Image (spheres, rainbow, N blue to C red):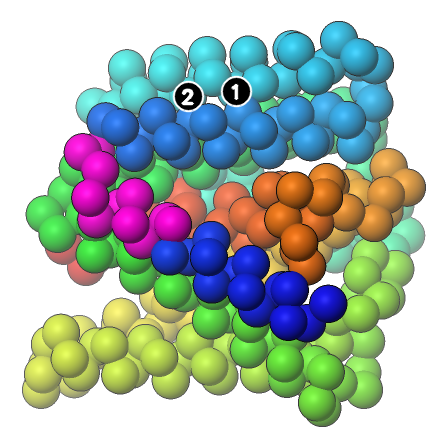
Amino acid sequence: MLKQRIITGFVVVLALFSGVYFLPPLWFFIVLIAIGAAASVEWAKMSQSMGKLGVAVYPCVVIALSLALYYFRDFAILLYLVGTALWLALTVVVINAATKRPPNWLTEFSAFAIITLAVFSMAQLLAIPNGKYWLMGMIILVGVADSAAFFAGRRFGKSKLAPHISPGKTREGLIGGLLAVWAVALICGVLIWSEDYSQIFVFALIFLVCALFSVVGDLYLSLQKRICGVKDSGSILPGHGGILDRIDSALAVAPVYTLFVTTILT
C-alpha cells in the first residue's frame, strides 16, 4: 500500500510538472477543467444528493462555472478573496464538526465553489511572470505538507488531531508537515532572493499559512466522506483513492496561494 502510494504520487507530480512546463496556458487550463470535472463526478457519486443525475449535472456545472470565471478574469483578485473567505468559513465548519453536522446544502454548494475557484486560481497563476514556476511551487508545497505529515504521523503520531473527522491524522503529523514546508520554503527563498532576508521570511511565512489551509482542505473533504459514509472518493489512483482524495489539499491552497503570490510576491 505504501509502495503504491509513493509510486502513484511520483507519477501524478511528474505528470503535473510536465503539463505545467510544456503545455500552453490555455491547454493546461483545459486539463485543469477536466480534472475538476472528474473530481466533481466523484463528489456526486459520493454524496448521492441527486442520484444518478448528479453524475451528469455536477461536471456540467463545474465546467460552466470554470469557463464563466475565466471570462471574468479581470476581477481575478476579487475571486481569490472569495475563495480565501470561503475556506476560512469552511475552517469554522471543520472546527464545529465535532458537535454540529454541516447542513446538507453545503455539500452541493461547496463542491461547485471550491473546485471551480481552485481551477480558476491555478489557471491564473500561469498568466503572471514566471507563472509556471509559481504553480510548480504550489504543487511542491501541497506535496511536501501531505507527505511530511503522513510520515511524521506514522513515526511519531500519538495525539489525534480531529478523531471525529479523520482518526488517522495526528497533531505530530501536522507539526511535521508544517516544519517540512517551512524548511523547504526557506531553502527555496534563499535560492530565489539570496540575501534579501525579509523577502525570504515573508515567502516562508506565506508557505506556512498555505500549509495550514492544506490541512483544512484535507479535513473538510474527510468530513464530507465521513458524512457520506465512504472511505475514499474513488479508486482510480492506487494507494490514494480517487482524484478528489488526491487534490483535497490543493483545492484549499489554490486561491489563498494565488492571492498571496499575485499581491505580495510578484
Residue type of the residue flagged with mark 1: Val
Task: Give the residue drawn at x 57%, y 29%.
Answer: 38
Depicted 266 relative to depicted 56: above or below: below
Q: Is residue 238 magenta?
A: no
Q: Which mark is residue 66?
A: 2
**Residue 156 on image: x %, y %:** 71, 91
The part of the image, by quadrant, that contains residue 113 is top right
Identify which amino acid the numbered label 2 is placed on: Ser
Q: Give above or below for 56 relative to 99.
A: above
Give the residues in magenta.
15-25
Residue 235, given in percent of the width and then of the height, sits at 72, 44
Q: Residue at x 12, y 52 (%)?
A: 130
Q: As drawn, is 228 to the left or to the right of 210?
A: right
Q: Residue at x 70, y 89 (%)?
A: 155
Is the residue 133 above or below the residue 68 in the image?
below
Residue 239 location in percent, x, y?
A: 68, 59
As drawn, the label of residue 62 is 1
